């Protein structure tokens, strides 16, 4: 399905599961839809399954937004406590559209608890209390974290698991989201590499695919020194970054994160922020930008080197891979609730980039990377790591184990269903007249209390890849058009 087709479906107010391979433009499609809603005076609730993902989309974790926190089950007592919270009931009641990003990392029990909260607060027996629910993600990527009660779950792949994924929740069936499976590709432009990634995704890896990886195999000592290394464990990441920084001559410059607001929300922001609490930099340090800033010329994942420090303000000057000089100033990560700031953190949008974990690389695009998959312990880790890189020539493999090219067997079967459902949806909506789709969109905006104004920029469906949801909250434009006209 094309991004433009998915946007047409989203605008009708239908519940949607938006999926597709890495680089297919899921984030850009949602970005465009969010801008469209805001241009009509509708503010969507933007959430994600993890703190890192929530930081990327400028929203809350779904756990925080719904008030369920870290609970694994929801008793009547727990639910009553949530219902007694004025700010939670207010934000859920005000919501008309709920977006949940990285749904692949959300367990079925959690999705069911969120649904129950929405239904109870809104006093509506429809799934999620009648909200338009947009589930975004790719189940081939990292799965939900298995709780420690399951012995050795983080040390070895489970041979078979049941009800691990959000789509296993009964509420997924009752919600019955239209599947929009994006098929465009905006990250990888290497046919051989795309074939390899597709083979991993379909469970059809053959000797020829492994041969391509063998050709990219390097000893760690011979790998490019300035390419970021992806590891499966934090211990390896910290070791490499600390060792490389220590080897550099010159004085270390230290930048400490500042914070404001509710301690709980601040803690959540810090967990999700890729920039560290205390950042040590030296001239010559390999760095990676951790935030999007089109005006300044960088995005989350842009690589560069510290060339110098400003003699007046001490800010680092980065020379990026695409030959740009950027003086880096502090950036702010914030969480808002009903238009009001709840918490914020301020730090340079940088981190040392000699190494990073596979988990924290999810959502990034890299021109090159040194990848060590010898410690893979979970389905999807290898696929996520490899798909961060744009082309095979930018991939340097330190090693891998026999689990590195595996994806979850349940997902292999489910993926064919998702694709078939998406094809059927595209065919169904393709038969509708544009006027009919337009009428459904107008009716949905009216139901949301939106302003029916024209905004060609917001409705633009120009395809684009690895974008992130906008965090800019615009005020609804004033219009002479009467509400609902």
Image: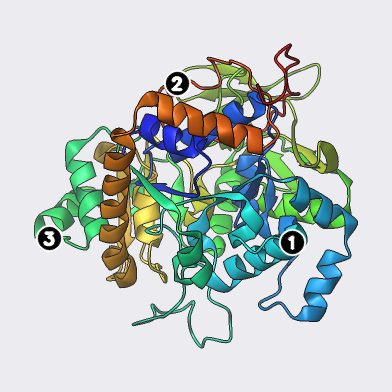
- Of badges 1 and 3, the one in the foreground is 1
Gap between marks 3 and 2 measured at Cα:
35 Å
Q: Is residue 1 above or below residue 145?
A: above
Using the rendered view, name the quadrant where residue 401 is placed: bottom left
Contact (CB < 8 A) between labels 3 and 2?
A: no
473 displayed left or right of 35: right
Closer to us: 339 or 329? 339
Q: Which residue is denoted by mark 2 in the rendering?
A: 322
Q: Nearer the viewer, residue 377 or 353?
A: 377
Residue at x 88% of width, y 51% of height: 262
Per the image, the residue denoted by label 3 is: 206
Residue to which mark 1 is pinned: 123
Mark 1 touches mark 3? (CB < 8 Å): no
Near mark 3 (Cα within 10 A), the count class, few <14, some 14-19 or many ≥20, is: few
Q: Earlier in the sequence, mark 3 or mark 2?
A: 3
Q: Is residue 303 visible?
A: no
Residue at x 42%, y 71% (from the top left corner): 377
Sequence order check, earlier mark of 2 and 1:
1
Q: Nearer the viewer, residue 475 or 123?
A: 123
Residue 189: x and y in percent read: 26, 32
Residue 65 located left or right of residue 456: right
Comparing marks 3 and 2, which lies closer to the viewer?
3
In what element is the residue under mark 1? loop
């Amino acid at each position: 399905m094309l991004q433009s087709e998915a946007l047409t479906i989203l605008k009708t107010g239908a519940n949607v599961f938006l999926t597709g391979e890495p680089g297919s433009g899921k984030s850009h499609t949602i970005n465009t839809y969010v801008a469209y809603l805001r241009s009509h005076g509708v503010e969507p609730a933007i959430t994600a399954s993890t703190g890192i993902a929530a930081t990327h989309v400028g929203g809350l974790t779904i756990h925080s937004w719904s008030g369920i926190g870290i609970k694994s089950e929801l008793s009547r007592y727990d639910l009553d406590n949530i219902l007694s919270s004025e700010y939670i009931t207010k934000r859920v009641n005000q919501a008309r559209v709920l977006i949940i990003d990285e749904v692949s990392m959300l367990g079925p029990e959690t999705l069911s608890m969120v649904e129950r909260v929405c239904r109870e607060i809104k006093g509506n027996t429809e799934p999620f209390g009648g909200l338009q629910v947009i589930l975004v993600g790719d189940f081939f990527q990292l799965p939900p974290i298995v709780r420690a009660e399951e012995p050795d779950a983080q040390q070895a792949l489970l041979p078979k698991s049941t009800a691990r994924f959000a789509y296993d929740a009964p509420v997924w069936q009752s919600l019955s989201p239209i599947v929009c499976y994006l098929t465009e590709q905006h990250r990888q432009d290497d046919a051989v590499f795309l074939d390899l990634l597709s083979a991993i995704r379909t469970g059809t890896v053959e000797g020829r695919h492994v041969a391509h990886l063998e050709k990219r195999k390097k000893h760690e000592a011979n790998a490019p020194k300035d390419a970021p290394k992806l590891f499966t464990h934090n211990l390896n990441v910290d070791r490499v970054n600390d060792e490389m920084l220590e080897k550099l001559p010159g004085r270390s410059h230290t930048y400490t994160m500042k914070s404001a607001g509710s301690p709980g929300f601040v803690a959540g922001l810090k967990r999700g922020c890729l920039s560290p609490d205390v950042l040590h930099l030296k001239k010559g340090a390999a760095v990676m930008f951790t935030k999007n800033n089109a005006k300044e010329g960088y995005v989350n994942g842009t690589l560069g080197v510290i060339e110098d420090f400003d003699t007046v303000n001490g800010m680092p000057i980065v020379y990026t891979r695409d030959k740009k000089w950027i003086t880096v100033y502090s950036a702010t990560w914030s969480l808002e609730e009903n238009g009001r700031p709840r918490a914020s953190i301020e730090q340079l949008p940088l981190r040392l980039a000699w190494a990073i974990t596979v988990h924290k690389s999810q959502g990034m695009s890299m021109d090159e990377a040194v990848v060590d998959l010898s410690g893979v312990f979970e389905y999807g880790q290898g696929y996520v790591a490899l798909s961060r890189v744009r082309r095979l020539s930018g991939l340097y493999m330190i090693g891998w184990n026999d689990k590195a090219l595996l994806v979850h067997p349940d997902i292999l079967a489910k993926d064919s269903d998702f694709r078939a459902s998406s094809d059927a949806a595209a065919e169904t909506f393709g038969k509708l007249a544009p006027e009919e789709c337009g009428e459904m969109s107008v009716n949905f905006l009216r139901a949301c209390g939106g302003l029916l104004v024209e905004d060609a920029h917001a409705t633009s469906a120009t395809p684009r890849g690895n974008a992130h949801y906008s965090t800019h909250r615009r005020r609804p434009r004033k219009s002479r058009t009467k509400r609902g006209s």
